[in-house]
Amino acid sequence: MSSPSPIPGPFTLAVARTQSVDALVDELMAIDDEASELFRTAGITLDLPAAHPFVVAERTRWARAAREGQVIVAIGPSRPIVAFAAHGTLDGLAYLDQLAVRPSAMRNGLGQRLTEAVVDDVRSRGARALWLTTYGHLSWNAPFYERLGFARVHESECGPELRATLADQRRVLPRPEERVAMVRAL
């Protein structure tokens, strides 16, 4: 597979606004699928059908986040949306549910910009920390977040919903032993 041509900037960040949440979630799923190609290069493949409970739950969370103004998108000049961050809450605490960038828009600082936009948003909503789950062994996962001020957290320090999220991910996602929780104090 050849690499897509890079999308030149500038990119604008905005809270996703849409008439159709379903259409937006379809676009987010497509971006996430494209971004998942990077995992394949590391030997991590996951190909779940749309009706799989894990995928259905993900769509449901992202739809709720969109309705609540908790999806931030990066809009590029040649495509409507090139990246997104969806967030919500677990255990009553701010949680970064997903961050995904189309391969053609990678290496433009969008992951960092979107993460900081989520930090600003949750801080404005009164959050004192932002939690997430990710792979601990991939440079574009835990080490990326560590550079942004996140720290790995032992599972025993997580609330019950976050522990359940980790357990669900470990049941379905490849390399379950590499899934970690992280937090950034705000």
Image (spheres, helix red, strand yellow):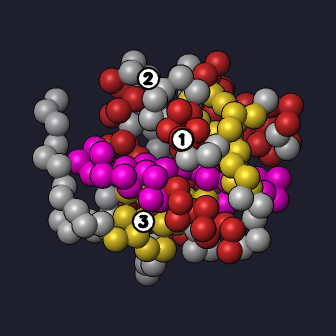
User: Residue at point 86% right, 31% down?
Assistant: 156
Q: Disc 1 on helix, strand or loop?
A: helix
Q: Nearer the viewer, mark 1 or mark 2?
A: 1
Q: Is residue 178 magenta?
A: no
| Sequence order check, earlier mark of 2 and 3 | 2
Tell me how far mark 1 sits from mark 2, CA to CA.
Answer: 23 Å
| Sequence order check, earlier mark of 1 and 3 | 3
Locate residue 101 relative to residue 66 in the image: left or right.
left
| Residue 84 placement: quadrant | bottom left
In the picture, the disc for residue 186 is none
In the picture, the disc for residue 73 is 3
Q: Disc 2 on helix, strand or loop?
A: loop
> Do the residues bearing badges 1 and 2 touch, measured as CB atoms within 8 Å?
no
User: Residue at point 36% right, 42% down?
Assistant: 35
Inspect this view and state whether residue 79 appears: no
Locate residue 104 relative to residue 43 in the image: left or right.
left
